[in-house]
Amino acid sequence: MQQRFGSHEITGLPHDEAARRLQAEGPNELPSAKPRHLVTIALEVIREPMFLLLLAGGGIYLLLGDLQEALLLLGFVFVIIGITLHQERKTENALKALQNLSSPRARVVRDGEELRIPGREVVRGDAVLVSEGDRIPADGVVLSSINLSVDESLLTGESVPVRKSEWDGHVERQRPGGDDEPFVYSGTLVVQGQALLEIQHTGIQTEIGKIGKSLQTLEPEHTALQRQTTRLVRVMAIAGGILSAVVALTYGLMRSDWLHGVLAGVALAMSLLPEEFPVVLTIFLALGAWRISRKRVLARRMPAVEILGSATVLCVDKTGTLTLNQMTVGALSVPGELLLTPDGTPPTLPDAFHSLVEYGILASQRDPFDPMEKAFHQFGDAYLVHTEHLHDDWSLVHQYPLSKELLAMSHVWRSPDGRDYIIAAKGAPESIADLCHFTEAQQAQLAEQIEILANQGLRVLGVAQASFTEAADLPSAQHDFDFHFVGLIGLIDPVRPSVPAAIRECENAGIRVVMITGDYPATARNIATQIGLPNPDRVITGDELLTLSPAELQQRITGVNVFARVVPEQKLRLVQALKANGEVVAMTGDGVNDAPALKAADIGVAMGGRGTDVAREAAGLVLLDDDFSSIVAAIRLGRRIFDNLRKAMAYIFAIHVPIAGLSLIPVLLGWPLILLPIHIVLMELIIDPSCSTVFEAEQEEANVMARPPRSAQESLFNGPTVWWSLIQGVCALAVSLLVFAVGRLVTQHGDAARTMAFTTLMVANLALIITNVSWTRSLFATLRSSNRPMWWVIGGVVLFVGVMLYVPFFSKLLSLMRMSTGEILVCILAGLVSVLWFEVVKWSRKSRQTVT
């Protein structure tokens, strides 16, 4: 099997030879940063405040002569290193998966078959096809090209694109830069034309490899939430340090026991230090991006994950996003006759339409990538295969590409005998009419015919033909040919079956969908009606956009959801107008000219299947399957990620209140210390994995897509969240203090009272996790959910409490005592009571929403 590029036959490497070269020479990528060594991570942990506090606590226990407590505290350093390693591996694995997805794609031919593969799998000798907007995947030579120009500014610093010529097989490899050279270089950008390349150097052997620059790396970015969290941790750490110093000083002065005073200060500092915040945030964003990628949406930038749940407007292309991008011929129109073929399969094709299909095919590539050109070829193969209207033996001499000034393209073909030259043109009907020099009357008649086809939901292209005698004297522009109008071809692109339901979901979620298309208004209205867009009859065209001032556009755009005959450059105006109205805009795009709009949008969404590398680089998200419903699924996940992150942060804030209170209040009241540093460390070992696994794995709330988008300026720690968390923490603190006071009064033993208070706090901690996992479901409904990590945490805590109470070695080490069955029941009941009031709050809020 062979592919063709113009008149160039392509077979490419055999699959097994490509695999052998990939194995022998390595992937086409530059060396990435090596995984951090265990020693490096350990050194980072040593610099952490929590480690220093553990070290201080262990030192004090050594001074007090308590070797077991000292060794236990210092031993927890290795546990913390283990947890850090585990969390880092989860984060790096997620980021690595994203990095593999974000690798540039390359079109290669192997064994005569065209494939799209990751750029890292390109090997020496590969035949690679590139076109406008593509990044060149590796260094190579041009075997065949059409109007090829490449931006090599990445290597040369020169912003002007350079022309490329075809390789004669003898010219030696040159440095980048300069016109009419046959060499192309990894990472440079095709700005015009198309070409067939042969790869000569990959990976570190490329020019970009030699100068040590790395492309397409995916690094975790510092997002707005990360900066906000860092500021909060810094403030709390400073406040905790000051308060701890005051506690240590007060304890020492009141009891003349400075070592225990410092120990109390260390315990309070450990209880107030919210070191979980940045760790949990990083894990949530990394795993969130990974989860979104499983919905066929690649998050190239972390801020896009944060802002997904805030999107208020989705601006989407019609072709390939709302539709299947699988064109079929739906109608043929020649002067005086019309043939409608809604299913693309008429029983026979009348002779009057043969020339129209013939010239439509001649105006297309031989082996097309474009869906419309594929539809022409498929239709011709079905109905012209035994006629004289297919010309596999003709040679393509020249191409006149489509331009901004003229939305039409022409192919010049030479017959086998070399005497005849036929020119076939196709493009926007207005442009074809311009080439054919239509009179006003002809243009009016053509407009009527276009309207008939467009009202059927068809995309309409015009076809024209001309002839020429001498190829050497080909004119420089299409207008210089004497074109004759052949007819119109109407193409239909079916709506994706999942789109109407996704549109309804967006409407329920308070997200407005705006369709932008280059098609005619009638076609746009037809599609808008099929997918269920509100107000499908209100349409603004690209020509109208040119006449509207920014203020007028801002006003008009509020009630219009359909924009037709829009060119890519006008998308930027639409984005700017929507943002000026206070909308949070997600914009889809696939071409080079879409890049400004994608970059200007709050969330740029590039097409992964048909999109160019330039569009993907400008976007925050890449839609791997080009499906609109995938965007909606990503928004649903974005809302889930933010909700779960907020619940995790609320839980951290809530549990730190009783831990800090049980460290501080006994000092102020002259009681024995309730929580020792080792108890606080044990609590931290529960808090961290709970947030990283239980909350992150929780499914979205039932109403996640039945509420308006959150404000993009909304803080993670907003007033209601902090308020409810504070109340939860204070209740858990009050119940634990009450249990300690009663236990001390009844048992007359400090360790027994401490055991009851600590056990109550552990139960309250579990109850806080379960009740905060969902703010709409009851605690009992949450226990019936499919959150497996939650059950692992519950089982681990129950096992841990049993070991610390009933294994003498551990109970002595932790200054705890065995409890009776009655005392255990009191602790369980007290811990549950501390959070049951929040269940009443959830029930009340849910009842009010139901009534509303």
Image (tube, rainbow, N blue to C red):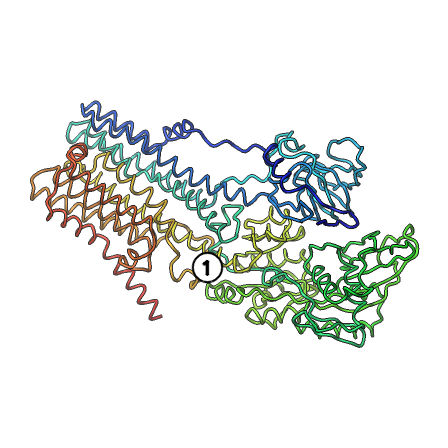
Look at 60% across and 48% down and name the residue there.
616
Q: Position of residue 178 (x, y in %)?
A: 78, 36
Give the answer, above or below, for where 40 lies relative to 5. above
> Quadrant of the rendered structure where residue 819 is?
top left
Q: Secondary structure at mark 1?
A: loop
Look at 59% across and 60% down and name the residue there.
321
> Quadrant of the rendered structure where residue 804 is?
top left
User: Which residue is under mark 1?
Assistant: 709
In the rendered structure, the answer to whether residue 232 lies left or right of residue 388 reads left
Look at 92% across and 54% down and name the residue there.
470
In the rendered structure, the answer to whether residue 456 lies left or right of residue 92 reads right
For the residue pair 113 and 246, the one nearer the viewer reads as: 113
Q: Position of residue 834 (x, y in %)?
A: 21, 52
Category of crowding for the residue at label 1, using alpha-carbon neighbours closer than 10 angstroms: few (below 14), some (14–19), many (at least 20): many
Count of numbered tags: 1
| Residue lying furthest bottom | 336
| Quadrant of image for the C terminus | bottom left
Give the answer, above or below, for where 171 lies relative to 161. above
For the residue pair 568 and 799, the one nearer the viewer reads as: 799
Give the answer, above or below, for where 842 lies relative to 26. below
Q: Position of residue 721 (x, y in %)?
A: 34, 53
Q: Position of residue 710 (x, y in %)?
A: 44, 57
**What's the amino acid at mark 1?**
Pro
For the residue pair 313 and 774, the one nearer the viewer reads as: 774
